[in-house]
């Protein structure tokens, strides 16, 4: 692929396949489309959705270059016929035009052909001189997204009307070059989808194996080939020290150098080296500190029960809505234990006086589970953490593909 940095005055992209030359033609979507329009939600809303029939595409089904069909709705023939003018054809471009997902775009595939869309999704059907997959990717590029943003008052992405969509400026090369650009991006999108499936399969494997191991359906053997001794039913408070966080003063946030982990900062892997949480000038007691290989749990809020492991060197403090765990046994084993359904179901069943779920250190400590001896804990933890590491490796590959796609979207269009 050729770099066109020396032709910045010409109407050509930064990157281009070497076999093509000549400037791209400036147009608007309205000049290149035979249809720009959306549908309606059937009277009765979700109550009229069926288990099968004609696909009914809503904004949540339109992703960034792909369709998300896990929760696709269906409508019957009668409802479909009332919306015949929004019937989907293969490779129609779908664009979300309202709400938080405004600007997401995908192509109609065989799974939804003959279906319909609601009022939040716009159908763009192109003329022969504009390849639909080229348009779809253009809308996702920096150039398309900037124009979509420009229509929103104060940058608040509220909604697009059809005239605004038709007025979006797009530069196009020959259909042959459009096709080649679109195919390159399609290959990367397919690889991203494959990589995402690899990760989902590994997560399912981890979930199944950990559930079976920690409910004694699978047992480990010692070096001599003998099954380890029986597990003992114990409270977590018998084997763990569960430490709640410090009540930092909000007035002292965003100053000082002490990193503070809050519930919103809890990810599966927490990297302190590029931690973006809050900072405080307060320096609490060391018991509120977390370090590499410690794990933390959210005690309330939207991330209630979520756990995250500190991956790299450095220290941070936890606030009062976060707990950390310490033990003389195998900490990694207990990190795996609190991620299985048994534990999650237990904490979800705890009554709370607040509108949001909320648990205490004592609630966690009162959870009862069968616990093996330290040697078997270590074997189990090693096995499950190997799957975790594999998942993180595959996530890094996925991130690399995503960055590659973003680079191309920024440089293959104008």
Image: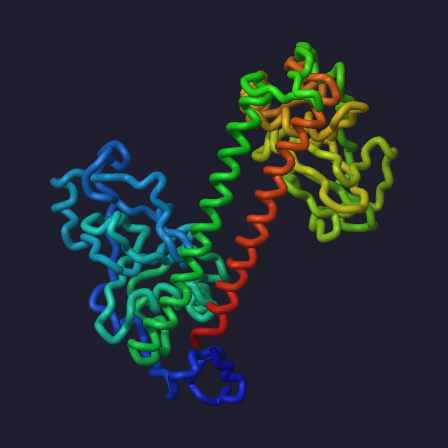
The residue positioned 69% from the left and 38% from the top of the image is 309
In the image shown, does 41 or 114 lie closer to the viewer?
114
In the image shown, does 401 or 316 lie closer to the viewer?
401
- On screen, 261 above or below 166? above
Residue 280, position in %: x, y? 80, 45
With 211 as the anchor, is 263 left or right in this view? Answer: right
With 177 as the anchor, is 311 left or right in this view? Answer: right
The residue positioned 19% from the left and 39% from the top of the image is 53
Determine which quarter of the picture holds residue 186: bottom left
The residue positioned 20% from the left and 39% from the top of the image is 75
Figure colour scheme = rainbow
Q: Is residue 49 visible?
A: yes
Determine which quarter of the picture holds residue 290: top right
Residue 72, position in %: x, y? 31, 41
Q: Is residue 349 visible?
A: no
- On screen, 115 above or below 242? below
Toward the front, the furthest residue is: 224
Residue 302, position in %: x, y? 57, 34
In the image shown, does 257 or 2 lie closer to the viewer?
2
The residue positioned 45% from the left and 67% from the top of the image is 141
In this figure, what is the number of numbered marks? 0
Rendered-image quadrant of the C terminus: bottom left
With 2 as the anchor, is 81 left or right in this view? Answer: left
- On screen, 267 above or below 97? above
With 173 as the anchor, is 211 left or right in this view? Answer: right
Residue 74, position in %: x, y? 24, 39
- On screen, 241 above or below 398? above
In the image shown, does 358 or 220 lie closer to the viewer?
220
């Amino acid at each position: 692929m050729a770099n066109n940095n020396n032709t910045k005055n010409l109407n050509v992209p930064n990157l281009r396949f070497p076999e093509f030359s000549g400037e791209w033609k400036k147009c608007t979507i309205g000049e290149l489309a035979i249809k720009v329009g959306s549908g309606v939600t059937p009277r009765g809303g979700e109550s009229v959705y069926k288990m099968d029939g004609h696909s009914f595409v809503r904004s949540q089904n339109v992703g960034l270059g792909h369709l998300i069909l896990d929760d696709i709705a269906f409508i019957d023939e009668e409802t479909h016929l009332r919306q015949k003018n929004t019937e989907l054809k293969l490779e129609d471009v779908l664009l979300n035009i309202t709400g938080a997902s405004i600007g997401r775009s995908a192509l109609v595939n065989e799974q939804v052909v003959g279906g319909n869309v609601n009022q939040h999704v716009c159908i763009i059907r192109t003329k022969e001189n504009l390849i639909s997959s080229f348009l779809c990717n253009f809308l996702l590029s920096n150039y398309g997204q900037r124009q979509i943003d420009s229509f929103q008052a104060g940058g608040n992405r509220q909604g697009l009307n059809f005239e605004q969509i038709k007025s979006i400026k797009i530069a196009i090369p020959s259909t042959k070059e459009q096709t080649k650009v679109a195919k390159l991006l399609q290959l990367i999108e397919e690889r991203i989808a494959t990589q995402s499936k690899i990760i989902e399969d590994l997560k399912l494997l981890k979930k199944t194996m950990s559930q079976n191991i920690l409910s004694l359906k699978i047992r480990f053997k010692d070096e001599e080939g003998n099954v380890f001794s029986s597990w003992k039913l114990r409270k977590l408070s018998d084997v763990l020290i569960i430490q709640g966080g410090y009540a930092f003063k909000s007035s002292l946030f965003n100053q000082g150098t002490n990193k503070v982990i809050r519930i919103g900062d809890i990810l599966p892997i927490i990297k302190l080296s590029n931690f973006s949480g809050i900072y405080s000038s307060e320096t609490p007691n060391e018991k509120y500190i977390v370090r590499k290989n410690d794990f933390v749990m959210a005690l309330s809020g939207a991330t209630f029960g979520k756990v995250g492991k500190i991956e790299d060197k450095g220290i941070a403090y936890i606030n009062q809505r976060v707990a950390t765990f310490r033990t003389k046994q195998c900490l990694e084993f207990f990190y795996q234990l609190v991620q299985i359904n048994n534990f999650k179901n237990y904490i979800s069943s705890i009554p709370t006086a607040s509108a949001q779920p909320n648990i205490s250190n004592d609630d966690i400590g009162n959870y009862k589970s069968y616990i093996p001896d330290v040697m078997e804990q270590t074997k189990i933890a090693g096995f499950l953490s190997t799957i975790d590491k594999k998942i993180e490796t595959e996530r890094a590959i996925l991130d690399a593909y995503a960055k590659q796609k973003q680079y191309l979207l920024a440089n293959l269009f104008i």
